[in-house]
Amino acid sequence: MTEAIDRSTTRPGTTGPAWRAPVLVRWPSVLAVAGTCLGWAAVFALSRDAGTGHVHHLLMTSSMSVAMMSPLAIPVCVSAGRSSLWCTSSRCIAAAYGAFIGAWIAAGAVLHVVTEVAVRIAPAEAVAVVLATWCALDVMSRRRSVRLSACAVSRPLFPGSAGVRAVDLGAVAASRCVSTCWAPMALAVAQPTLGVPVAVVIVSERVLAPRNRWSIAVAFCAMTAWIVVANWR
Amino acid sequence: MTFIRRNIWSLGTANNPWDPISLGYAHAVRAMQALPLTDSRSWTYQGAIHGIAGTQPPAGAPWNECQHSTWYFLPWHRSYLYQFERIVRSFVVAAGGPADWALPYWNYEAQGANSLPRVFRAKTLPDGSANPLFVAKRNGGTAAVSINNGATIPSSVTSSAVAAASTTFTTPAASVPVGFGGPKTAFAHFGPAPGLLENQPHNIMHVFVGGNGGLMTDPDTAALDPIFWLHHANIDRLWETWRLAGRANPTTQDWRARSFRLRDDAGKTVRMRARDLVDAENQLDYTYDSLGHHVGAAPAAAADGEPLMARKPVMVGRTDAPTELTVDGAEAVVAVGPLPRRRARGAAGDAPTQFHLELADIEGTVNPGVVYGVYVNLPNKPTEADLEAHRVGLVSLFGIEHSTSVRASSPQRLRYVFDITGRVEGDGSNVKVVLLPIGGLGPRRRGAAAAASPTVRVGTIAVHAS
């Protein structure tokens, strides 16, 4: 028997004319998608530049934070959009996204400093191997799936203080996200050539988890192997 | 062999309610209650699979795995009942009971069946020993007007009409309207919002039967009340009825491939996939003696991808502070702001045509054990007719213990959505939302007692337009 059409799931609001409303009200994830594109553009532009100073490194880390973590901000933007009055939704979505990404840029800067210290103690490749192994083990732990569930945050955005509460929503979501994804981010900071694969894996984890955590763990193991093989000679 | 689950009210007689199926269940429950928690066939272990508070599960034990407010609610509970039924049958047969024993169901919607079945009210078995099906911790305890004394349950509480009319199984997790089976989520002990069948009659009956402090009111103790299993058999029957009426279960792999971990009648771990649980008779060898009045009814609308709402819903009004909900109820006014307009003018005009009321961000540590009616624009000093006309749904707060970090490591606040189309006048109008207790049983707490009872905070009361 073929089951060509999934008749059970319908997405509200897929027919009929669109609202006359700001673009963020209609598509709350636009900002996060734009952030992802701009972040990666900045990462590639900076990687062509041969700068080696602290400012260059911090700019690189910040761009990487925006590029890698913007997709994870999509649920935050959707939550802010659906919890606020439509005429204030744009402001709330922007505030929540700004707080989420701002917190991640700050976390990225801290991870950058910590990684800088770590590579003075041990070779950068060894630090990356430890981090990638940690990521693979963490993916398999039961506590991680609980932390992933906790990343979905909702807050009442009362009309009188919607902007402030949206910032709080973004910051709380970011704090939970940092506690879940600090290790992959640190791995990308320690080994910038792994930025793209790490970003793909952490987004895939959100989409697939917890059903396919084995494949996520295997991906991190593959990164570990790649670092070892690439630096073996 | 196809096992037939029978209506508990069709078994036995008024003079002698103890038939072989009920008696077999009672003896099996007693035998299971005598086993230690470490035995997967024990009553407490089976209850812990649904939920248990404050006890660390042994390694590999599938405890605290019940699925609520998620689209796995129906298949998970079907697998849970299926394995439980096999365990009980093994005890029934071992005691010389019928080999074709099947779990009975409680169809509280049927005329004359809207009170607790007699065998669950009797304090003793025919042989004079204590009846394990009797539980004192139910709504009203043993007061004159209580579930245990045969109080009738209002039809507004038992009705499954809203769920039965739904043609869509699921919607996205953040969606304002919800489908029959719950929102599309990951495997979740408690998800973002109950589906229509889960909210009513499932959640409502849990709290109406359990009342304040009753076993059925709390998900972590609910399965310890023997009536739990008959209640869920009825929910399972309503799902089968819905499917046989031509409605479609999910066909995506996310849902169909999801497996549920349980223990069988030999104590072994078994996994059952949702795709193997969609057709009770052909896949699981059981059916019901009656599949309800919805069978054969044409679907109200084509299920073929028709959206629940014509346009993406937007929030057009919300309260500007949290609302405290006590055992006496709550009241709030939502000011509806400017409504958005559509880009193209159609025959239906360019203004929103559908409205939904959302109660969300609800948190509390203890369920007050009250079922609330939700009323829109209810007049002051309402008559019974007013209450009937202005009621848009019921809420029972089932699972609220998991809405804060007191009981849950990743708390999920409760959320309910009701269709209020036709009850919103337009831009600048006020929507008065009132929550009032429904058909209270036993002594109602008033004054200081009511004030001292734990309150529930409703963070969001909002109106959505589409």
Image (spheres, rainbow, N blue to C red):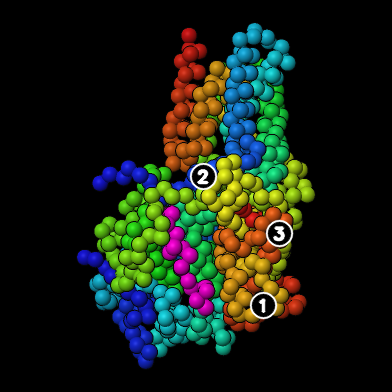
Which span is picked out in magenta? B154-169
**Chain assignment, label 1:** B
Q: Residue A16 carries which label?
A: 2
Q: Which residue is drawn at 26% across and 68% down?
A: B3
In which quarter of the view is residue B104 placed?
bottom left
User: Which amino acid, mark 3?
Assistant: Ser
In which quarter of the view is residue A43 placed?
top right
Query: As rendered, which of B231 and A34 lies closer to the eye?
Result: A34
Q: Label 1 vs label 3: CA separation? A: 21 Å
Q: In this view, does B127 lie to the left or right of B396?
A: left
Q: In which quarter of the image is the N terminus of chain B?
A: bottom left
Magenta-drawn stretch contains B159: yes
Q: Which residue lies furthest to the right in this view?
A: A160
**Residue placed under numbered mark 3 in the picture:** B429
Mark nearer the viewer, 1 or 3:
3
Q: Can residue A210 be seen in this view?
A: yes
Mark nearer the viewer, 2 or 1:
2
Discs 2, 3: same chain: no
> Percent from the top left, x then y, of residue B409?
60, 51
> Percent from the top left, x then y, of residue B236?
39, 64
Q: Residue at x 66, y 18 (%)?
A: A60
Query: As rendered, which of B392 and B146 lies closer to the eye?
Result: B392
Q: Label 2 vs label 3: CA separation? A: 25 Å
Residue B143 to residue B185: above or below: below
Discs 1, 3: same chain: yes
| Secondary structure of residue under mark 2 | loop
Q: Is residue B106 left or right of residue B423?
A: left
Residue A163 to residue B365: above or below: above
**Residue placed under numbered mark 1 in the picture:** B382
Q: Which mark is residue B123?
A: none
Residue B235 to residue B130: above or below: above
